[in-house]
Image (cartoon, grey):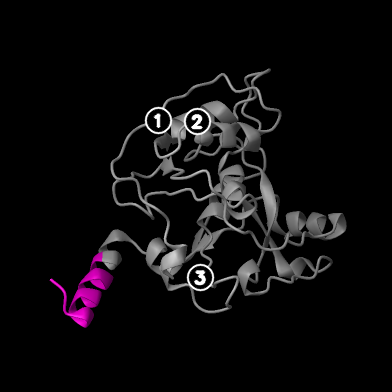
Amino acid sequence: MSERKPPIPKEKVYGEFKGPYHQKTVIERIEALFLDNIGKVVTREMLIQVARDPETGRNRENWHQRLSELRTDYGYTILSYRDWNELKPGEYVMPTSEKRTIPKRRLTPTSGCWRKVLERADHRCEWNDDGNYCGLEEGETDPVGGGTVHLTPDHKLPYSMGGEADPNNPDHWRALYGRHQVMKKNYWDTLTGKLNYYAIIQAAPKEEKRKIYDFLKQYFGGD
């Protein structure tokens, strides 16, 4: 578990927008922004700015999904307020440019399967958190994160638990958009198949973290 713990900077320092960034894709521009600010805070406003098309100035897609892909598909460590108490929601830090070993590439549904998923979802995000249904529509502006809602397929069975969803079965998939793809809780370690306790604590609200902290102090006899 210790080797999974992300490094925390010694102090909170805000980064700078060193653009303009003219990389072809959104994910390349976001990557360049973080690499220009290793160990420093990158804000939501900076991410919205770098995600904007450098030629047209349009916000073509929500940046949350690309941020998630930098973590999951590229192997970068990117801290949020869930990882470091000093950070506020909408603040992120890449503490190092080193990349982790990443798992095998994910399956995706066939075009016909994905079409059926979107029809079932009425082209709206199917995120449901304790009865709170998202319902943001494809192409709509995200009132929280900014940018345009772009729906992508999500495994109902968590990828790290196997995630071998049938590419032809729409019941194995749901439509989510970037911000909720990032928020999706994934509590199983990809390599061992065991519960990832660190991720569970990481996603817990601050008050629950305090309870866990108090329990561990009592358990280990610390102050």
Counting from the top left corner in percent of width and height, residue 103 is at 66, 63
Q: Residue at x 80, y 60 (%)?
A: 109
Magenta residues?
A: 210-223
Which quarter of the picture shows residue 192? bottom right
**Does the residue at mark 3 contact the one at mark 2 (Cβ under 8 Å)?**
no
Measured along the vertical axis of the image, is residue 169 above or below residue 108? below
Residue at 75% over, 70% down: 165
- The alpha-carbon separation of the residues under discs 3 and 1 comes to 31 Å
Query: In the drawing, what numbered circle is on residue 2?
Result: none
Classify 10 Å Cα crowding around label 1: few (below 14), some (14-19), many (20 and above).
Answer: some
Residue 182 vertical placement versus 221 (above, below) = above
Q: Amino acid at mark 3?
A: Tyr
In the rendered structure, the answer to whether residue 106 lies left or right of residue 136 reads right
Q: What number of labels is visible?
A: 3
- Residue that lies at the very extreme toward the left in this rendered image: 223
Residue 139 in the magenta stretch? The answer is: no
Kindly identify the amino acid type of the residue bearing the numbered disc 2.
Asp
Provide the residue designation for mark 2: 36
Instruction: Describe the element under mark 3 as helix, strand or loop.
Output: loop
- Where on the picture, by quarter, is residue 215? bottom left
Q: Residues within 10 Å of mark 3 (few under 14, many from 20)?
A: many
Secondary structure beneath label 1: loop
According to the picture, the residue beneath numbered tag 3 turns out to be 187
Viewer-nearest residue: 180 or 106: 106
- Please state which of the two labelled residues, at mark 2 or mark 1, is closer to the viewer: 2
State if disc 1 and disc 2 touch (CB < 8 Å): yes
Query: At numbered mark 2, what does the secondary structure look like: helix, strand or loop?
Result: loop
